[in-house]
Amino acid sequence: MNNDGYQTMSEFVCPRQAMIRLHRIEDDGWFISTYVKEHNHEFSMLDAVKKKWNSHKMIEQPIRDTVKYLLENNVTLSKLHYLMGSLYGSKENIPFTRRSLRTICAQIAREQRNDDIRKTLDPFRKIRAEDPGFQFSVELDNKKDQIKALIWTNGKGRSDYNCFGDVVTFDTTYNTNLYKMPFGLFVGVNNYFQSTILGDVFIRDEKAESFKWVFSEFLTLWVVVLPQTILIGMLLACLLYVAVYSYKITMPCQAEHHKA
C-alpha cells in the first residue's frame, strides 16, 4: 500500500537504484542534470528476462494482426500461446508475457464485439436481397449492445413448411458456437420421410421470455396454417407453456421425452 492509499504490485523488480534527473529549459526543451552511472546495469540478453520489462510488453502490429485472425477463427488463448511458441522457436523465446497476450486478446474481443451486430446482419440483408423468400428477425439488447435473439428462414424453408408443416420438431440442444448461444432448429419431414430444415434460431438464453419472442416471430415469418403438432422436449415444453399459452398465442404442442 503506497502513501496515497493505492495497492501496488510489482511483477519484476530491478535491485539497482537507477536515477536520472531532467530539467526543463526556457525553449521548452529538457536536459539531463544528474545521472549516476554506477546505478545503471547492462542490457538484459535473455528473452525470459527481457519480456518482464514494461518496454517489452508491447506486441508488434504484425503479430497483433495474426492474433486477431486466429481469434476470428475461434483459436483459444492456450492454443495462441502454443502457436506463438512455434513461431518464435519455443515458448521461452516469446518476447512478451502470456498476460500481455491475454490483454491483447481482450482488446481485440472488445473491438469485435462493438461491431458484431453490423457484421452479423449485413450478410443477412445481402442474402435477403438475393433471395426474396429469405426472411429474418432480430431482437437487440441495447444495454449490452448485442444480439439477444435471431431467427431466420429461406425461400425453400418457407415453401417446405407450406407442404410439410403439419408436424414440426423444435429443439435447442446445440450450443457449440463462440458466443455460447443456444441454437435451435425448426425441422419438418417430407413425403419421403426425410428431414427438412424449416428455419433456425439463436437465442441468448432458454427462458420463457425468449421462447415467447421466438414463437411470436415464428407465427410472423412462416405460418400460413398453424402446425397440427409441435414435438419438443419435456423441459422445453414447460417453458413453452409459459411462453406461448400464457401470452394467448394459439398453438397446439405435443411434448415427447427422449432418454439420453
Image (cartoon, helix red, strand yellow):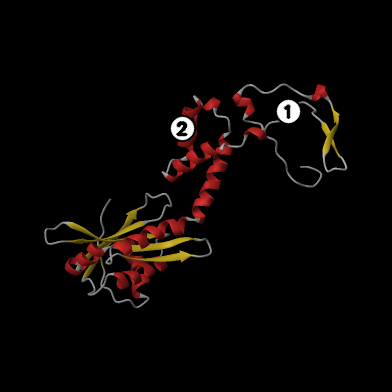
Q: Secondary structure at mark 2?
A: helix
Quadrant in which residue 35 is drawn: top right
Q: Is residue 160 visible?
A: yes
Rendering coords of residue 77 (x, y %): 49, 39
Work out which quarter of the rendered image holds the N terminus and state it. top right
For marks 1 and 2, give the CA distance.
30 Å
- Which of 255 and 133 lies nearest the eye of the viewer? 133
Rendering coords of residue 219 (x, y %): 30, 72
Front: mark 1 or 2? 2
- Residue at (81, 30) in percent of width and height: 19
Q: Looking at the image, which residue sits at the far bottom? A: 248
Crowd tier of the residue under label 2, counting other residues whose Cα lies within 10 Å: few below 14, some 14–19, many 20 or above: some
- Residue at (11, 58) in percent of width and height: 192
In the rendered view, does 183 fall on the left or right side of 231? right
Rendering coords of residue 208 (x, y %): 40, 67
Asked if 152 appears above or below 4 in the picture, the reply is: below
- Marks 1,2: beta carbons within 8 A: no
Quadrant in which residue 39 is drawn: top right
Asked if 94 appears above or below 233 in the picture, the reply is: above
Q: Amino acid at mark 1?
A: Cys
Quadrant in which residue 148 is drawn: bottom left
Q: Is residue 201 visible?
A: no
Rendering coords of residue 260 (x, y %): 28, 50
Residue matched to label 1:
14
In the rendered view, does 26 fall on the left or right side of 76? right
In the rendered view, does 1 fall on the left or right side of 202? right
- Residue at (46, 65) in percent of width and height: 140
Q: Which mark is residue 83?
A: 2
Q: Amino acid at mark 2?
A: Leu
